[in-house]
Amino acid sequence: MGGCAGRRLSDSEGEEANPALRPPPQDRQGTHWKNAVGFWLLGLCNNFSYVVMLSAAHDILSHQRAPGNQSHVDPDPTPTSHNSSSRFDCNSVSTAAVLLADILPTLVIKLLAPLGLHLLPYSPRVLTSGVCAAGSFILVAFSHSVGISLCGVVLASISSGLGEVTFLSLTAFYPRAVISWWSSGTGGAGLLGALSYLGLTQAGLSPQHTLLSMLGIPALLLASYFLLLTSPGPQDPGGEGEADTAARQPLINSEAPEWKPGSSSHLSLQERWTVFKGLLCYIVPLVLVYFAEYFINQGLFELLFFRNTFLSHAQQYRWYQMLYQAGVFASRSSLRCCHIRHTWALALLQCLNLAFLLVDVWLSFLPSIYLVFLIILYEGFLGGAAYVNTFHNIALETSSEHREFAMATTCISDTLGISLSGLLALPLHDFLCQLS
């Protein structure tokens, strides 16, 4: 690990490949685009269920279905569980409860990843991720209680966490530019997930039918991995010349993903500790960024309630989620336009966002919901930029034999920050709702 100073380590794999062994340019170009689109779709599908569950958080907690009436659900229920005396129009339970159900299983998976999860073959992990994603949609759609719905959210968390560890580790065996495509896909999941839930419920579809309509996403995840992505081969370590990557066969016809060149399973404990210490200058800022933004998203969004608009409380919450994800998508797709080396600056700006909106929740000084819309869009920009630039910087500064371990280890950062924010958002919700 080269640290945060930007020094890029040389790889033994960086020697010029024999031109006679390279496939024709057309095949190399086709391979490049298959991998690019493949990682984009994997990012999209992997994070989709996670985002949808957060977008549905207000509905999950505010809505209680009668056992015999699950087939028709009012997309904008007026629940009796609200605290009508509160100026915030509070649910009895904070949406941070959904956040915790959506993130704690992911945290456990990511904590286990550097300790031995990487020893499991890739294909069974991908299959498990797809099955859990499908199960989450079905369980939440047919649930009659908040408890069962939260179990469905847990399945979405398992799917997303296992998938992120798997696919980020897999990028270690492809040209580095696939990290940009993966990040853009995860940003697209945020935007499309939040927008689809908002759009379908606004159009009058019930939350149940909206969730069931999304069952094609897990199938697309499996198809992208097994049919589209090509198996890893010798890399161009510069990461900019994907066209020089050797031609590969589809994964469904090859066991190459199970072949892990420079696998982190061969690293000693001392080597892992050394790599981890070098990663701290990226891990700490990313933890802070995600702590601040998810404290806003699941601790404050529900409390940023404007009564003088045409949007109901549930609709306001969905718009907040959609605009945040739009900002994330834009910034996660911006790596080719803007590369940020000092990610600590993004952490500082995100913490300032949190402080500003927390003061507004307390004092209610912002006159219009549209100002909040702009702040939330900006919040998404910062979060997405921190994510894509962190992993891109690590890919540039990590040697090939350490890269898989570094990617799997650093991906715990966002999850740790989100988990801490959810734990603090729960008592904040109760405190403010009881005071007001």
Image (tube, rainbow, N blue to C red):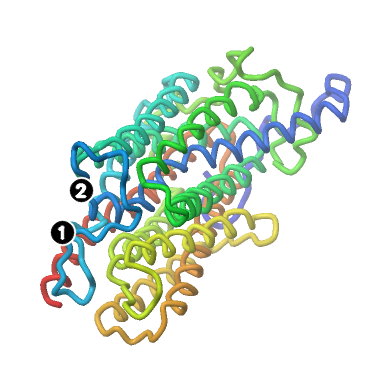
Question: Does residue 341 appear to the left or right of 236 in the view shown?
Answer: left
> Pointer 2: what residue?
64
Q: Nearer the viewer, residue 256 or 144?
A: 144
Check disc 1 and report the residue beneath it. Answer: 81
Quadrant location of the C terminus in the rendered image: bottom left
Q: Is residue 356 left or right of residue 180?
A: left
Q: Is residue 274 visible?
A: no
Q: Secondary structure at mark 1?
A: loop
Answer yes or no: do the residues labelled 2 and 1 have beta carbons within 8 Å? Answer: yes
Left or right placement of residue 398 versus residue 109 in this view: right
**Residue beneath the point at 69% across and 55% down:** 336
Q: Position of residue 128 (x, y in %)?
A: 40, 24
User: On residue 201, which mark appears?
Assistant: none
> First in sequence: mark 2 or mark 1?
2
Q: Is residue 35 above or below residue 344?
A: above
Front residue of 365/393: it is: 365
Q: Quadrant of residue 95?
A: bottom left
On the question of residue 420 being in view, the answer is yes
Q: Amino acid at mark 2?
A: Gln
Locate residue 265: give its quadrant.
Answer: top left
Helix, strand or loop at mark 2: loop
